[in-house]
Amino acid sequence: MENIIRKHYINKIERCFGKETIIVLTGQRRVGKSFLLRQLRDIKLNEANTNVIYIDKEKREFDSIQTYRELNDHIESHYQKGKKNYIFIDEIQDIEEFERSIRSYQTEPDAEIVITGSNAKMLSNELSTLIGGRYKEIYIQSLSYQEFLIFHNLTDSDDALSQYIQFGGLPGLVKIGLEEDDAREYQMDIYHTVLLKDVIMRNKIRNVTFLENLVRFIADNAGKLISANSIAKFMKSQGENITSTVVSNYINYLTEAYIIHKVNRFNIHGKRLFESNDKYYFEDHGIRNALAGGSREGDIEKVIENIIYQHLIHLGYSVTVGQLQAGEIDFVCTAKNGRRCYIQASFIIADETTREREFGNLRAIKDNYPKYVISMTPLVTRNDDNGITHLHLRKFLMEGLG
């Protein structure tokens, strides 16, 4: 694992240097932010006329750095004038008022700053309040399918895809292996760490039992339209009196920790966002599978939809759920240039009823943007069906939408 470089992210970071911008690597714990930062540190250590100041708040040698003043003292004692100083700080949210220190060094002409954080609220509240738009967020995801193949030394095949569907993309699995019991134990350990540090402790959660039940509920209903009200009603039917406000707050805490992602609904014809009933997907579908338990035979479509969503984000699309008068489109994807496409996710198109459901909803959209069905239907690679492209999941994960 030490020799594997996620070039996609390293290149993104490198392109931001020299622009007087603080680079913030965000994402769920254990998706590889720390590893990327160490790789970047090693790259810069081998460059001429550079000085690297590296702080890892998860290591005990940096326990003494608790406040921005102690952070200032540490950086100042290692800073070298006349050289390009790279300041790398891992899990910076553990330092009180860190943004004060970062703001002061951001103005230094010979400094480049890269920090990591595992909570979205850190950006929206603490960081952005003081430095405004002077930062670039780079969102780090679990391994894509292509990265999964590289990390586990696999070749693209149905068997490799099956393992990716089952185990997900936590980079640490390369050390643990893909044996069911070991992988699930590791995934649940990571899940409990994230839940404790980035949700329970940060937000002073008291009703931990409900929080855990909520995550499992979302795992069971990944890819389904749900609302805070519907969850509150369900909990009431289970004998637990939880208000929709509490549900909404807890869901926000989970999204801030990047455990789950909320995807809004978009009225395709009315061109507006709805304000209720969203879909939720997991950052890592392996953790989702560990929470749901069992094999994937009964929930394969949920997992495929989760995988497609995450890969669309990896490709740079912004994603919403499409709403038509007569039905739903799984994903409305908008590229950075404003171009749109529509995607339906399915397991296998085995009969006319399934075909009509998946392709029929796309045909009901009366515009000329590209339309796709992505499935695991045998013998399909990339077929055209009256203007709708039918892609195999492996083809999509290896080559994108083409």
Image: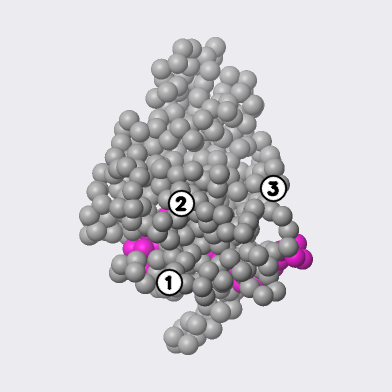
Q: Quadrant of the N terminus?
A: top left
Q: Distance between the residues labelled 3 and 1?
A: 33 Å
Which dot, 2 or 3, sits closer to the camera?
A: 2
Give the mark toward the camera: 3 or 1: 3
Residue at figure coordinates x 25%, y 48% from the top left: 176
**SS for dot 1:** helix
How packed is label 3: few (under 14 Cα within 10 Å), some, or many (20 or more)?
Answer: few
Disc 2 from disc 1: Cα separation: 30 Å
Q: Residue 381 carries which label?
A: 2
Tell me if I can see residue 60 in this picture: no
> Who comes first in sequence, dot 2 or dot 1?
1
Q: State the quadrant of the C terminus.
A: top right
What residue range appears in magenta? 267-292
Query: Disc 3 or 1, which lies upstream in sequence?
Result: 1
Check disc 3 and report the residue beneath it: 339
The amino acid type of the residue labelled 2 equals: Thr
Q: Which residue is drawn at 32% across and 46% down?
A: 172
Tag shown at residue 83? none
Q: Quick check: is 276 in the magenta stretch?
A: yes
Name the residue beneath numbered marker 1: 220
